């Protein structure tokens, strides 16, 4: 124990001889002992998140040990309490253990036995408090990641941690651009499964003929290669089904079967495989639900999930300025741009514009402002230096790509991670501007000594 922090122990014992003797034995083991003869005094002195163990006699003057135990459980259900008694009451011991007592000893007991029980309980207590600290830190991150001070933002922040810790399935609903996928990911990051896989599945692209293979996988055999489906990749973590309304009724039915049974049968497999995962579903709300409406309703009813409805930006207008600052700071940092002062015209636009694209539109507006453009004047095609807007954007985009390639030494994977751009989109843009990654590699034909092509 010399290499660890001393274990704090609250010892409640009214026997004038036994109390000091037990306290001395525990101190010889390096523990920090506070000795009390009455439960009321110990209860008043005990701090919140006490990092140690409470050891209490059952028979005490005034408040007895069992009442103390119940009150401690109300304050902190995870606080380890060891109960002792001079009366061989087996029924009392069983009842106390069922209610969460760390241990129960009948006097006389050996100090070595009590010390072992305290050391074990203290170890478990350290883990409990560490998990609490992690949860609080993650909740603090959520407070920072979910921006806004509106009533909606405050309520949703309060719900996110509770939903995450409960490990329940969730349906996140809202109009386009309200941050449904972001909220689903945030719930995963706040919960016990945060270190496990988070696998997003875009239902809108699952009309492809290989959708079954992508989702459910296949067993090897008959010339087939083994392939783990996306659903199975989420085992132990969270499966996000994005835009469920875009999936065909047939695919929704297959997904429902998986969700109800929590098992999957890959192509060519003889037996289904059990899954342990949480399901997050995003659902876009709009005026016309179309033919998928009934299937969506059945899907959500059978899922039995908690539902979170995300307000559009018009319903949380007070958050627009704070969100804009957040997006602007992020884009300036990612693009390594100096801060650009925000004009009164922009602040007015933030408060008066309807933002039909919600957060996605606001994010794009912040990026536009960060790179030196202004789209608030819709009558003028000229935005920067008298140049047409599309040419200014193209020139800036090409510069960003060149800088990223140069910084990454032509490593396309690093460029993809730096810019947060999908691989196919990145290659399309490189082809558009005639940029070749190999020319930025140290052993390639570097562009440093080549003339810059004009867009």
Image (cartoon, helix red, strand yellow):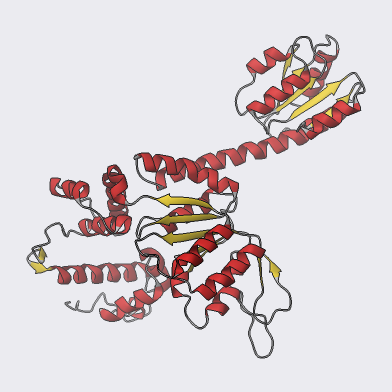
Between residues 76 and 334, which one lies in front from this camera angle?
Answer: 76
Residue 230 visible from this viewpoint = no
Point 66% across, 36% down: residue: 126
In which quadrant of the rendered view does residue 212 lie? bottom right
Between residues 262 and 182, which one lies in front from this camera angle?
Answer: 262
Residue 58 visible from this viewpoint = yes
In which quadrant of the rendered view does residue 442 lie? bottom left
State whether residue 322 is above or below residue 172: above
Left or right of 232, for residue 113: right
Quarter of the image with the N terminus is: top right
Point 37% across, 39% down: residue: 151
Percent x, y of residue 276? 65, 60
Quarter of the image with the C terminus is: bottom left
State whether residue 51 is above or below residue 254: above
Percent x, y of residue 430? 31, 77
Percent x, y of residue 15? 84, 11
Point 28% across, 71% down: residue: 402
Left or right of 193, for residue 368: left
Left or right of 313, for residue 6: right
Point 6% across, 66% down: residue: 386
Between residues 174 and 53, which one lies in front from this camera angle?
Answer: 174
State whether residue 155 is above or below residue 55: below
């Amino acid at each position: 124990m010399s290499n660890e922090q001393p274990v704090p122990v609250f010892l409640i014992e009214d026997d004038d001889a036994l109390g000091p003797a037990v306290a001395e034995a525990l101190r010889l083991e390096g523990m920090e002992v506070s000795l009390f003869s009455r439960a009321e005094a110990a209860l008043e002195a005990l701090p919140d998140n006490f990092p140690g163990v409470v050891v209490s006699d059952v028979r005490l003057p005034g408040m007895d040990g069992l009442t103390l135990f119940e009150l401690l459980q109300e304050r902190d259900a995870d606080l380890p309490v060891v109960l002792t008694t001079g009366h061989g009451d087996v029924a009392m011991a069983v009842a106390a253990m069922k209610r969460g007592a760390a241990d129960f000893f009948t006097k006389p007991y050996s100090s070595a036995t009590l010390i072992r029980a305290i050391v074990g309980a203290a170890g478990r207590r350290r883990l409990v408090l560490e998990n609490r600290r992690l949860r609080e830190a993650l909740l603090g991150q959520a407070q920072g990641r979910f921006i806004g001070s509106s009533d909606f933002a405050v309520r949703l922040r309060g719900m996110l941690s509770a939903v995450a810790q409960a490990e329940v399935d969730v349906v996140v609903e809202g109009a386009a651009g309200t941050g449904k996928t972001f909220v689903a990911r945030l719930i995963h990051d706040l919960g016990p499964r945060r270190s496990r896989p988070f696998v997003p599945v875009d239902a809108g692209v699952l009309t492809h003929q290989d959708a079954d293979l992508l989702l459910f996988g296949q067993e090897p055999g008959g010339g087939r290669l083994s392939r783990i489906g996306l659903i199975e990749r989420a085992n132990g973590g969270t499966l996000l089904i994005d835009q469920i309304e875009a999936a065909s009724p047939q695919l929704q039915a297959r997904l429902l079967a998986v969700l109800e049974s929590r098992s999957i049968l890959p192509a060519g497999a003889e037996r289904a495989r059990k899954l342990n995962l949480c399901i997050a579903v995003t659902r876009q709300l709009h005026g016309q639900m179309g033919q998928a409406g009934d299937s969506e309703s059945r899907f959500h009813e059978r899922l039995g999930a908690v539902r979170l409805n995300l307000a559009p930006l018009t319903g949380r207008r007070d958050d627009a300025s704070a969100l804009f600052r957040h997006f602007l700071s992020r884009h300036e940092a990612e693009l390594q741009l100096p801060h650009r002062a925000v004009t009164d015209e922009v602040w007015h636009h933030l408060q008066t514009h309807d933002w039909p694209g919600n957060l996605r539109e606001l994010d794009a507006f912040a990026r536009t402002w960060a790179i030196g453009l202004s789209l608030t004047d819709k009558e003028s095609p000229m935005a920067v230096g008298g140049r047409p807007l599309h040419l200014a954007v193209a020139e800036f985009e090409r510069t960003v790509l060149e800088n990223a390639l140069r910084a990454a030494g032509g490593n396309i994977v690093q460029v993809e991670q730096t810019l947060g751009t999908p691989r196919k989109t990145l290659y399309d843009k490189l082809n558009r501007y005639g940029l070749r990654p190999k020319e930025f590699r140290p052993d390639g034909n570097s562009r440093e000594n080549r003339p810059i092509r004009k867009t």
